[in-house]
């Protein structure tokens, strides 16, 4: 294979940028083991944009295994960048819907994903839950039925292994696996609960989001990560004290969808950094910055 010092001359000797010969040269260099060559090829494909897509797609389907793998990586990187731009445009809005934002974020992991199936799952949860609670007296009985359905029957519970793994953050993955981080599980509970006609919200406790259910003039606080356990205000105060956070009634008020979406993106940025996915972390940090401005 060529040495790293050959990278610039080999590209320089190729035909005019964007020509068929130039793109074919770039495709052939996908097999080069040199990080310097791959960095330059990546830059060339980035500059060419859509012009190079057909060749990359062909290379991803046929040819040597290494070429196919690297072509697929390039295409995924391009698609993720495109999805980041969509996320930034959404983040720049004055108002946000948490469910819409989280499903948009899911497509950063898999740009080709069709999230309609997961929305239908939430619809099914909501319909089943609605049938259960509509015959119950408003208040504790409805909350208990809610927890029984989500935690016991559907089996949603906190992820104890590899807590910061992206699969515990992305909404679609958490729905499929029925486990996740506190914020993700609270979101799933809330989306199902709202479909069933319950008044629910997310409480912005630091490091461990809780779920608020407003029923019959009362506030019920649930911990979906802990299997839907019902907790009281004293428990919340002890949690804050244990983490050296001053108590504030703000933690017992429903957070805005913008705030929760920002926290969700922040969780994902942190997860990417832990796994050395620096490019993804930098891309998502842009979304994070725009959401901070929107929340201000």
Image (tube, rainbow, N blue to C red):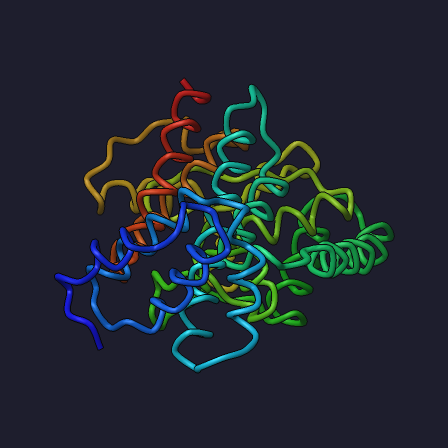
Q: Is residue 31 above or below residue 196?
A: below
Q: Say which of 211 and 50 sits in front.
A: 50
- In the rendering, at what x and y percent does residue 41 appear? 33, 56
- Residue found 33% across the figure and 69% down from its top: 162
Asked whether, in this view, residue 44 is left or right of residue 18, the answer is: left
**Frontmost residue, 247 versus 49:** 49
At horizontal 77% and vertical 57% (from top left) the residue drawn is 120
Give x and y (percent) for residue 292: 39, 26
Question: In the shown orientation, is residue 17 left or right of residue 219?
Answer: left
Query: Which quadrant holds the N terminus?
Result: bottom left
Residue 227: % across, % down: 51, 64
Q: Position of residue 206 (x, y in %)?
A: 33, 41
Q: Name above or below for residue 88 compared with residue 161.
A: above
Pick whichever, 9 or 192, lies toward us: 9
Q: Quadrant of residue 32?
A: bottom left
Count of marks overlaid on the render: 0
The part of the image, by quadrant, that contains residue 205 is: top left
Instruction: Tell me if residue 158 comes above or below residue 282 in the rendering.
Output: below
Q: Residue at x 66, y 65 (%)?
A: 148
Q: Left or right: 179 with respect to 137?
A: left
Which residue does the image show at 71% across and 43% down from the upper left? 194
Task: Give the vertical position of 16 relative to 115 (above or below).
Answer: above
Query: The C terminus lies in which quarter of the figure?
Result: top left
């Amino acid at each position: 294979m060529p040495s790293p010092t050959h990278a610039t001359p080999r590209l320089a000797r190729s035909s005019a940028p964007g020509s068929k010969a130039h793109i074919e040269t770039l495709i052939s260099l996908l097999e080069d083991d040199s990080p310097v060559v791959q960095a330059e090829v990546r830059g060339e494909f980035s500059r060419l944009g859509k012009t190079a897509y057909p060749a990359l797609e062909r290379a991803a389907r046929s040819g040597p295994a290494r070429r196919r793998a690297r072509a697929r990586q390039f295409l995924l990187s391009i698609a993720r960048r495109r999805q980041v731009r969509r996320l930034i445009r959404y983040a720049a809005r004055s108002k946000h819907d948490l469910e819409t934002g989280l499903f948009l974020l899911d497509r950063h992991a898999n740009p080709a994903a069709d999230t309609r199936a997961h929305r239908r799952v939430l619809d099914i949860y909501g319909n089943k839950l609605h049938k259960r609670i509509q015959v119950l007296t408003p208040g504790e009985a409805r909350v208990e039925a809610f927890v029984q359905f989500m935690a016991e029957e559907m089996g949603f519970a906190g992820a104890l292994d590899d807590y910061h793994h992206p699969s515990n953050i992305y909404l679609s993955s958490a729905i499929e696996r029925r486990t996740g981080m506190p914020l993700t599980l609270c979101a799933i509970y809330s989306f199902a609960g709202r479909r069933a006609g319950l008044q629910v919200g997310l409480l912005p406790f630091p490091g461990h989001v809780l779920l608020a259910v407003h029923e019959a003039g009362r506030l019920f606080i649930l911990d979906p990560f802990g299997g839907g356990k019902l907790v009281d205000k004293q428990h919340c105060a002890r949690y804050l004290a244990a983490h050296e956070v001053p108590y504030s009634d703000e933690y017992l008020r429903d957070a805005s969808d913008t705030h929760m979406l920002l926290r969700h993106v922040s969780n994902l940025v942190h997860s990417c950094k832990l796994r050395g996915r620096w490019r993804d972390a930098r891309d998502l940090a842009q979304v994070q910055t725009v959401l901070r401005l929107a929340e201000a």
